[in-house]
């Protein structure tokens, strides 16, 4: 991703009909502590990809984040001016603008928190929660941090929809605003786990390198009107059990 000549050669070899760019340094504390290295992944690489897509008018989708917002005035629609509070959010916001400058046909998809069933090659944050609860470990979870989560399956459907229908910005959040604490409570119910070790806390109680916005709930009405239809969070989690 960070070697332009190799990236260009890859495009020449594959000749993609479309590109969905999902690679990023997602760890906000790492971005905060290593801004130069993460900039190459989170800004330089996607901008180069947009330029290469523009060369051949290749359809392009970019996965951005709800963390481009400051968390003070949710829910956020596509027209709200971004105001990130940490370097990860800043880098994603810069990449959004840079990609659209190089290739205005890019679909910039601001993604919410996503969760998936573990596979041999992928997992998400819920697996560590499930493992900790099964092992009887205490989990401290924020009651003052809110998002609009979706399953990875739903998120990917949104990306494919954006590939066909969108140029510019689109939000692909779920229909439910929920705190981290309440989400894990729901996870416990669906997966029939013990919740005796769940502890409610506030962000101010935890020292972190990167400041985290309190509420980055997305208004995804635009996507809903195009046919993007997330299920309820309970249904999304129950679907993971049936896979």
Image (spheres, rainbow, N blue to C red):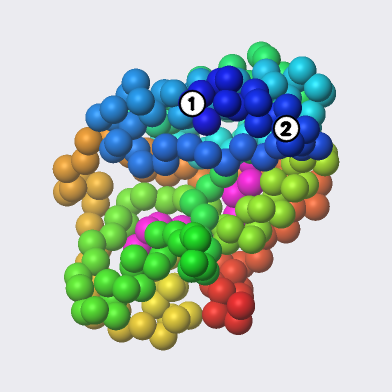
**From the viewer's perspective, is 128 left or right of 124?**
left
Residue 74 rendering spot, x and y as whole percentages: 50, 40
Does the segment drawn in magenta span residue 15?
A: no
Q: Nearer the viewer, residue 221 or 228?
A: 228
Distance, label 2 to label 1, CA atoms, is 18 Å
**From the viewer's perspective, is 185 left or right of 233?**
left
Taking the image as drawn, is residue 100 in sight?
no
Dot 1: what SS? loop
Badge 1: residue crowd in 10 Å (few <14, some 14–19, many ≥20): some
Residue 98 rendering spot, x and y as whole percentages: 59, 17
How many labels, in total?
2
Which residue is rendered at x = 42% and y = 41% of the image? 26
Badge 2: residue crowd in 10 Å (few <14, some 14–19, many ≥20): few
Measured along the vertical axis of the image, is residue 153 above or below residue 72? below
Measured along the vertical axis of the image, is residue 78 above or below residue 204? above
In the current view of this chain or complex, which residue is farthest to the top?
101
Which residue is rendered at x = 29% and y = 80% of the image? 134
Q: Which residues are magenta?
A: 170-182
Which residue is rendered at x = 69% and y = 46% of the image? 159
Does the segment drawn in magenta span residue 176?
A: yes
Measured along the vertical axis of the image, is residue 47 above or below residue 19? above
Q: Which mark is residue 2?
A: 1
Q: Looking at the image, do the residues carrying marks 2 and 1 touch, with CB atoms under 8 Å apart?
A: no
Residue 42 rendering spot, x and y as whole percentages: 47, 29
- Of circles 2 and 1, the one toward us is 2
Quarter where residue 101 is shown: top right
> Residue at label 2?
13
**From the viewer's perspective, is 186 left or right of 28?**
right
């Amino acid at each position: 991703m960070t070697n332009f000549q190799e990236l260009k050669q890859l495009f020449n070899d594959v000749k993609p009909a479309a590109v969905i760019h999902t690679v990023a340094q997602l760890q906000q504390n790492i971005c905060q502590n290593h801004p130069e290295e993460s900039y190459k992944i989170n800004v330089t690489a996607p901008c180069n990809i947009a330029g290469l897509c523009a060369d051949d008018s290749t359809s392009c989708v970019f996965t951005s984040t709800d963390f481009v917002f400051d968390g003070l005035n949710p829910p956020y629609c596509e027209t709200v001016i971004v105001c990130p509070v940490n370097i990860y959010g800043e880098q994603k916001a810069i990449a959004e603008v840079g990609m659209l400058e190089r290739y205005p046909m890019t679909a910039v998809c601001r993604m919410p928190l996503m969760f998936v069933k573990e596979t041999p090659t992928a997992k998400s944050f819920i697996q560590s929660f499930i493992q900790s609860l099964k092992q009887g470990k205490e989990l401290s979870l924020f009651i003052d941090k809110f998002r609009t989560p979706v399953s990875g399956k739903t998120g990917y459907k949104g990306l494919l929809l954006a590939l066909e229908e969108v140029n510019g910005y689109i939000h692909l959040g779920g229909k439910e605003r929920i705190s981290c604490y309440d989400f894990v409570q729901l996870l416990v119910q669906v997966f029939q786990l013990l919740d005796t070790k769940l502890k409610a806390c506030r962000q101010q109680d935890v020292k972190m390198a990167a400041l985290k916005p309190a509420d980055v709930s997305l208004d995804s009405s635009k996507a809903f009107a195009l046919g993007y239809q997330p299920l309820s969070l309970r249904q999304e989690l129950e679907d993971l059990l049936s896979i």
